[in-house]
Image: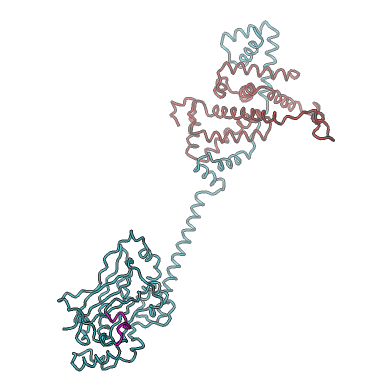
Amino acid sequence: MAASQETPFLQDEDRELIERCLAGREEAFDELVVRFQNMVFNLAWRFMGETQEAEDLTQEVFLKVFRSLRGFRGASSLKTWIYRITTNLALNRLKFNKRRRQNRQVSLDQAPAEDMPALSEMLADQRPGPEQRLHARQIESRLQEALDALSDDQKAIVILRDIEGLSYEEIADALDVNIGTVKSRLARGRAGIQAIMKDML
Amino acid sequence: MAPEKLIELLSAYADGEVSPAERDEVERLLASDPEAQALYRRLTSTTSMLKTMERVQAPPTLRHILRTRMVTSREIPFFQRMRLLVEKRRLRMSQLAYLLSFFVIIGMLYFISSSLLHRNELETAAIDIEFPEQEEEIVEAVRFARNEPQVNEYILPAEDEMEVPPVESPFPLYEGPSPEPPVQYALDAAAPDDAAAPAGETGQPMAAPAPRPQALAAETRTREPAPQPETHRTDERAAGRMTTDALARTNKSVTPEDEAKAKEETAAHAQSPYVLEGGRVPNVNSAAQPGSDANPLRADISFTVNARDLANQPTLPGGNDLTLSGRFNVAASGRIVWYRIEGPPAAQPVMEAFIAHLRASAQEPQVLNGRPVAIAYTFTATIVGGR
């Protein structure tokens, strides 16, 4: 691990934790997981929109963290570094899922079997009405739908800023883009959500 | 101002990420432009809703799943995986230490008990043979046989790696004047069929191979037949042919009459060599196997002993030098554990004295490559007459 003057962004607490992990202390691995698991899982859940995908992504993130810890130079804080890993892996996974969905595209107007209704009718029937939902749950669901409707780049920045509360500088560091790009993508992402949530604003 | 630029400016203003000039511009705009005010209000409402989104908690099983995946992941360093595995199995180092200590104690108990049992077995073997006075030698012989795997390290190395040290006789060599070539014992000349005479009679090393150590053990354990501590016996052909007079004559000076009588007696038994055999292992010839020339545990030696050096100074029959041949095994401690020599029947006293001399002389431990070993000697001994 580099000396503290070479790693200005790294806090002493993080540096000590990394050193213990590199020394093979299993309790240090546990501590690292406990400290960041909710952050990573929440971010993963917002990106992926479902629990199983979020769990898989979270495991992948921590394995990546443990593998790459020796190469971490402390150019950013440990938290930002983990955000970057999570975001990169999430974006990769989203791209992969989009390609997979395109390959498995099924027409909603086509009945899966002769004696079954079309998928569009089945989905319409199963969707609960507004009166059956709690208001907060409805907002939550609509916001997630709005997030999912954004491009991956905009979605990542909106999540990191408005849900996770990272500063522009941290976002730029995590996504490896400049501040101007962060501003423009964030504004477009927020505008996109506004458009979808127009009836609730 | 373009709508996109206005939205970006308002977004940054809402986050406090604008320069002082931009802040002044936005505040002036919000004070005068209702559309900008509505836009800003919707923007702050959106960000407020996003901030209130529920924070999802990681499932409690995540740590365990993660630990399992780390243990099985080949990209995690081996030792880290092993440590994680140990913790996953809930095995602590202290528990491993206890487990190790348990096996060490079991091993020590087994070693001690097997040593005691081994000793008891050896003692039983000695008692069974019913020669308590020679118990040590018997125990030694059995131990020698039991150590056969170690001995084999010396018996069976590669030939190019073997360094065969010079094997010297453990007995004093005759330092007097060189004896004349031993006169062939008179009985030999009188033998009607030289070709049938045993090799021992002709002064050559015995063709019969020396017994292997395992033969000693096998024969000792089986007690078949019961051995005798000092078996002075003759072949069945010579049995009973040694008279008391002949024995008595060997203890006094030889007269021409004695010599003539001895010639007569021995001529009658020309083909009946006297066999002197002792030790704990009878019938060794039945289990004997050929030895190897490259075997350092077997040695062929020739030496000359003055009859006057023998304990009871026996007189050689006929006054001639006597050539004996035979074998004897010397244990690692230097004791002779088995011997067998052959000679003319009339030479019995000389042979007995010679064996006594061997037993008295062979007391030095035999060492090969720094380790005590047992050596099987095939010898040719020339007993110089007591002239």
**Residue under the point 63% across and 13% down:** B8
Q: The magenta stretch spans which residues?
A: B192-202
Quadrant containing the C terminus of chain B is: bottom left
Left or right placement of residue B345 versus residue B11 in this view: left
Left or right placement of residue B76 versus residue B331 in this view: right
Locate residue B76, reporting x and y percent. Answer: 52, 39
Q: Nearer the viewer, residue B276 or B37?
A: B276
Asked if A60 appears above or below B188 in the picture, the reply is above
Q: Nearer the viewer, residue B105 or B72?
A: B72
Locate residue B22, reporting x and y percent. Answer: 59, 9
Say if the magenta span includes residue A55: no
Quadrant containing the N terminus of chain B is: top right
Locate residue A43, reporting x and y percent. Answer: 63, 29
Locate residue A34, reporting x and y percent. Answer: 58, 36
Chain drawn red in the picture: A
Asked if B254 appears above or below A194 in the picture, the reply is below
Asked if A101 appears above or below B212 in the picture, the reply is above
**Residue under the point 44% across and 30% down:** A2
Left or right placement of residue B242 versus residue B220 in this view: left
Chain drawn cyan in the picture: B
Q: Quadrant of residue B168?
A: bottom left
Left or right placement of residue B292 versus residue B51 in this view: left
Q: Nearer the viewer, residue A14 or B76?
A: B76
Say if the magenta span includes residue B197: yes
